[in-house]
Amino acid sequence: MSGSGGAVGFIGLGMMGLPMARSLLRRGRSLVACDTSTEARAALAEGATPGALRFVDDPAGLADAADIVVLMLPDSRVVAQVMEGAGGLLPVLRPGQLVIDMGSSLPGETRRLAALAAARGAMVMDAPVSGSVVKARSGTLAIMAGGDDAAWAKAEPVLRDMGEALIRTGAVGSAHAMKALNNYVYAAGLLATAEALRMAEAAGLDLAVFADVLNASSGRNVATETKVKQEILPGRYQGGFQLGLMRKDLETAGTIAAETGFDARALELCRSLWADAVAALGPKADNTEIHKVLGGGR
């Protein structure tokens, strides 16, 4: 059991946050959690060791209970609300406390909130994750971590209870930037894979054999390895990542292009096609369903 020290605060018990919080409990951590969903709170409480978990009504309630607070929230708008809104964390942060934003936020917003926390002697670190819900359940996520040495030293033991590969990326905000750019590369690979499958289908090729060719050749990528035979060809479309989240990450990558002045034309095309998929199927559809859209599916 790796749990030690005081309780960890946790805000955001969604699709990824719930299994991540469960991983902390499984590793012997005590949690103080906050979430607006009654169902999510009940799901986390189910099977928890007596005394290892309690809930508070608002984010500010975590400040007295935990030196480390993990946020697993949908986007920067919600993070700002949790930090700065009524009952928010920021006004009650103490010197030495650490907030770890593990969602996919805008790098500029992360830097802004880090500066506000630093004015109170507290720290903000970005630690977005890569991996599916399956990896969140098993505590084997890849975690990128942006922050100084003091934040890293405080965060590392907690992050290791949720992830297998931890990669320090540099200053605060750098991890959110790298996560967005990584997801752009993944989105482009999955899009190209889905298009190639549709063309192979139209040409009358054996798609299972084509998948073998891709995975033995230079076209191999994570989509060809983990999505084609597992999700797309059998028509399961349950890859574990929503279209709306993919679009959000691509929009974040777009802000990086704008901030740097880089003319990212391939990114613009990718953003447009993924936006079309969201319009066709809705934001909660699985990301592998881009294959349906390319085949005219709605």
Image (cartoon, grey):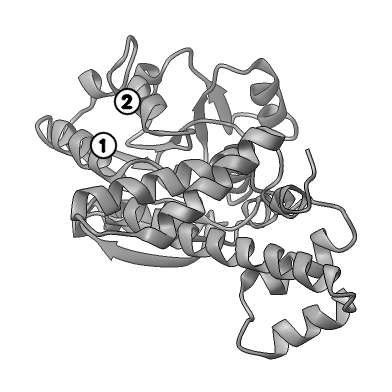
Cα–Cα span, label 1 and label 2: 8 Å
* Mark positioned earlier in the residue sequence (1 or 2): 2
The circle on residue 109 is 1
Q: Is residue 73 visible?
A: yes
Q: Residue at x 81, y 60 (%)?
A: 232
Q: Which residue is mark 2?
A: 80
Q: Residue at x 42, y 52 (%)?
A: 268
Asked whether 216 or 22 is in front, the reply is 216
Quarter holding the N terminus is: bottom right
Determine the residue positioned at 55% across, 16% down: 36
Q: Give the farthest residue toward the front.
A: 203
Q: Secondary structure at mark 2?
A: helix
Q: Position of residue 289 (x, y in %)?
A: 73, 49
Question: Farthest top residue?
Answer: 86
Question: Is 156 drawn above or below residue 201 in the view shown?
Answer: above
Q: Please give left or right for residue 213 compared with residue 32 in the image.
A: right
Check the picture and name the quadrant holding the C terminus: top right
User: Between 76 and 5, which is closer to the camera in this rendering?
Assistant: 76
| Cβ atoms under marks 1 and 2 closer than 8 Å | yes
| Nearest the eye: 260 or 82 | 260
**Residue 83 at x, y percent in the picture:** 31, 24
